Amino acid sequence: MKIAVLGAGNGGQALAAYLSMKGFSVSLYNRSKKRISNIIKTRTIRLEGEVQGAFEVDFATTDISEAIKGRHLIMVVVPAFAHIDIAKKVAPHLEDGQVIVLNPGRTGGAIEFHNILREYGVDKDITVAEAQTFMFASRLTNPGVVRIFKIKNAVPVSALPAKKNSVLEDTLLKAMPEFEIVSNVIYTSFNNIGAVFHPAVLLLNAARIESSAGKFEFYLEGITPSVARVLEKIDSERCMVMEALGEEPMTAKDWLNYAYDVQGENLYEAIHNNPGYQGIMAPPSIANRYILEDVPMSLVPISSFGKMLGIETPTIDSIVQIASVMMNKDFWIRGRTVETLGLSGKNVDEIRRYVLEGIM
């Protein structure tokens, strides 16, 4: 099986090298040449941390058509705000039988991506799927060098519609059995733990980030008991929206046990019992994907679905509003909503029929 990895940031380079280590033929695409110039020359990515070694990819390129040509599995590893751009770029070049996996989709990613392909007239037999989170906690340490702090035990994934999940068994799971196929994309989209762990922690540590350029451990120092209580409220509101959509949510505390085998009496304890978070530093600026991605592509759609379903999300709404003020951007307008996802006015039965059977 030939695999394309689209995006060469922290996650994309880690995933490309990891798949190469497993013996797969891997191409790596990035929009700009600067980040992959060294990989273009050497075709090598070095992994540090939980996986160590230097691994060769077939090639790295800034030509997306070259990257995906003849590739059965396409792993999209870019911030969720770039999904629309990637969908538009791949649309003219897709081939029958290709499987596209968003790593991760955040909230509504597969729906948004599928809508763009349809808008651009793609009539090929394509499967679009989304992961609930990214498989690794990883960071670039040098050009072409990535540290994998921790590989999660399992990551939920589902196709849109869910009736195509069997396709993932024959492709994605053969490459990475660490993925776990789940019921549908409501499960992956609304068990979006990044929505809980990223924006509020960054905003509540904004002064420290701006004064120190992020020179502290993001999770272990940035999440104090009071910050953790805010995260628990965000998590509770997320879970209520998910329950209203007919799916059983996984709490953030339960997810830490599922992904990392850690437990605690409360969310604060569980986070601080996770060795996978050791050494992960805070971003050097608040102009970071923890805000620019997770607010419009995670918190805004959760709030939007909540409003449509009559579920109040005051803590989530406050984080969106504060982020909008601090970044001087209106994330309510920039974010995914039931309107932009084409689901405005749909009831729960209609939404579930869409994600399960593809019937709109």
Image (spheres, rainbow, N blue to C red):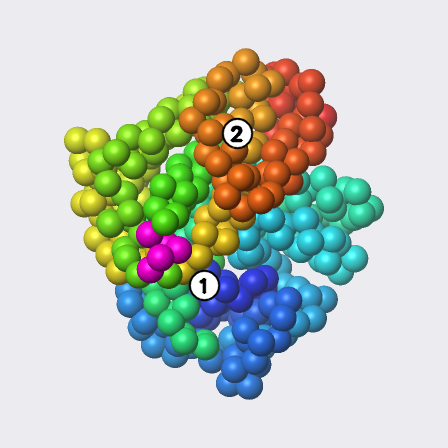
Dots 1, 2 in contact, CB < 8 A:
no
Can you say which quadrant of the picture contains the C terminus?
top right
Frontmost residue, 294 versus 145: 294
Decide: is 51 above or below 186. Answer: below
Q: Residue at x 40, y 60 (%)?
A: 284
Q: Residue at x 46, y 48 (%)?
A: 290
- Type of amino acid at the residue the image marks with label 1: Asn
Residue 105: tell me if it is visible: no
Could you give the CA–CA distance between mark 1 and mark 2, rounded to whole angstroms? 26 Å
Extreme residue in the bottom direction: 41
Decide: is 195 above or below 144. Answer: above
Residue 191, x across and y down, in percent: 43, 34
Q: Residues within 10 Å of mark 2 (few under 14, many from 20)?
A: many
Magenta segment: does it hold 211? yes
Residue 184, x across and y down, in percent: 53, 32
Query: Residue 10 bears which disc, if any?
Result: 1
Q: Residue at x 56, y 62 (%)?
A: 7
Tell me the element at label 2: helix
Bounds of the magenta span?
Answer: 208-212
Q: Residues within 10 Å of mark 1 (few under 14, many from 20)?
A: many
Decide: is 344 above or below 12. Answer: above
Q: Residue at x 45, y 76 (%)?
A: 144
Magenta segment: does it hold 260? no
Frontmost residue, 30 versus 279: 279
> Which SS type dominates the magenta stretch?
helix
Instruction: Please identify the quarter of the rendering in which residue 199 is found.
Output: top left
Please name the residue that numbered disc 2 is placed on. 302
Can you say which quadrant of the picture contains the N terminus?
bottom right
